[in-house]
């Protein structure tokens, strides 16, 4: 890999070099390094959040995807709610969510969701879902109803959606955008070369176009996307993804370490060290992203409330 220098005005040193970086695809000992170890969730606040979610019979991606940050986030009363059930119509190589034939859509779910958010007194909420290729609209109406229920019950709460790609679901994006979420997130997850193994039923360019279309429909909605590293990609391939996201006018990017949830999922090719994540953060800012979260434990909704508040402040200043 050729040495590259990236100018970044907000760092102490004027230039950051990639000469210390190895290809992200290189192999290492697969023992988990210290920088991605987390404490078990034991706090009273964590239990309170769990009890509320269980009581209202809601699903969370925190549990279903075995997120390593669940202890920290739930202790702060922050959870990413997963609507439309807990069974996905796809089977991605990285994802721990169950796949199969989903259940019927629960029309009362948006109202229960709004009640939990009110009880948790959330300033910002993230709503995601499984893929629902079995539905005519891919579940877009359920997203819309969830957003509207929250806005009615908790008018001061900002809403972020993390959606599927809605392939062959005409009008789905427009349905969700009409409810005016504050942030519309759709993850690319990985580089184009790895799509056939990582996102088997997805298409890189369809996902890019979804993000671009959101801005065309309503430029006031912040757009966001995320990728995982450690699956065999190279640093150059990650740079191309960042360029593609900026060409699609994406405001906010997240970059985190892929962790293999079970032995049946794709293996970790490399545990990417914190210095490499810092380089990618600086590079993304240099390319023009308004907000970047890049660290081993970063996930799409990790610190989403704090990051959104910082994003809004930056936009006000600019």
Image (cartoon, rainbow, N blue to C red):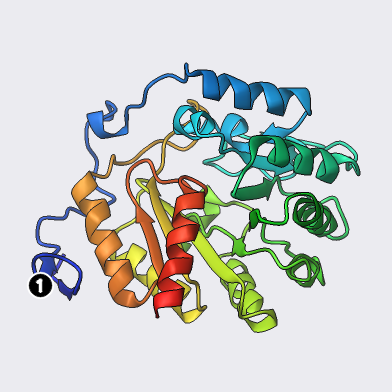
- Which quarter of the figure has residue 203? bottom right
- Which quarter of the figure has residue 209? bottom right
Q: Position of residue 166 (x, y in %)?
A: 73, 62
Q: Residue at x 77, y 66 (%)?
A: 179
Q: Residue at x 36, y 77 (%)?
A: 288
Q: Residue at x 67, y 41 (%)?
A: 81
Mark 1 crowdedness (10 Å alpha carbons): few <14, some 14-19, many ≥20: few
Q: Is residue 40 above or below residue 280?
A: above
* Res. 193 visible in picture: no
Quadrant (top left/top right/bottom left/bottom right) for the N terminus: bottom left
Under circle 1, the secondary element is loop
Quadrant (top left/top right/bottom left/bottom right) for the C terminus: bottom left
Query: In the image, is 152 to the left or to the right of 13?
Result: right
- Residue 79 vs residue 216, the one in the foreground: 79
Q: Position of residue 97 (x, y in %)?
A: 64, 35
Q: Is residue 66 above or below residue 269?
A: above
- Which residue carries the number 1 mark? 14
- Which quarter of the figure has residue 107? top right
Q: Position of residue 302 (x, y in %)?
A: 47, 45
Query: In the image, is 151 to the left or to the right of 17?
Result: right
Query: In the image, is 117 to the left or to the right of 252?
Result: right
């Amino acid at each position: 890999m050729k040495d590259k220098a990236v100018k970044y005005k907000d760092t102490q040193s004027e230039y950051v070099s990639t000469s210390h970086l190895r290809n992200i695809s290189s192999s290492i000992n697969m023992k988990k390094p210290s920088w991605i170890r987390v404490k078990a969730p034991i706090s009273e606040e964590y239990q309170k959040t769990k009890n509320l979610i269980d009581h209202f019979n809601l699903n969370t991606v925190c549990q279903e995807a075995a997120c390593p940050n669940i202890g920290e986030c739930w202790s702060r009363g922050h959870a990413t709610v997963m609507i439309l059930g807990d069974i996905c119509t796809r089977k991605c190589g990285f994802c721990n969510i169950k796949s199969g034939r989903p259940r019927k859509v629960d029309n009362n779910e948006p109202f229960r969701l709004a009640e939990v958010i009110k009880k948790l007194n959330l300033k910002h909420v993230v709503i995601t879902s499984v893929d629902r290729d079995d539905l005519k609209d891919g579940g877009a109406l359920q997203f819309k109803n969830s957003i509207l229920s929250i806005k009615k019950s908790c008018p001061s709460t900002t809403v972020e959606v993390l959606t599927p790609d809605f392939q062959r679901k005409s009008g789905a994006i427009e349905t969700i955008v009409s409810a005016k979420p504050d942030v519309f997130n759709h993850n690319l997850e990985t580089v184009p070369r790895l799509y056939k193994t990582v996102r088997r039923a997805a298409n890189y360019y369809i996902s890019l176009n979804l993000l671009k279309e959101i801005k065309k429909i309503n430029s006031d909605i912040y757009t966001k996307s995320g990728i995982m590293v450690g699956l065999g990609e190279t640093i150059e391939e990650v740079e191309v993804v960042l360029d593609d996201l900026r060409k699609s006018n994406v405001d906010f990017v997240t970059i985190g370490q892929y962790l293999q949830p079970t032995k049946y999922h794709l293996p970790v090719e490399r545990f990417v060290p914190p210095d490499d994540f810092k380089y990618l953060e600086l590079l993304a800012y240099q390319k023009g992203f308004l907000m970047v979260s890049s660290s081993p434990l970063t996930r799409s909704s990790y610190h989403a409330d704090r990051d959104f508040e910082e994003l809004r402040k930056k936009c006000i200043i600019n």
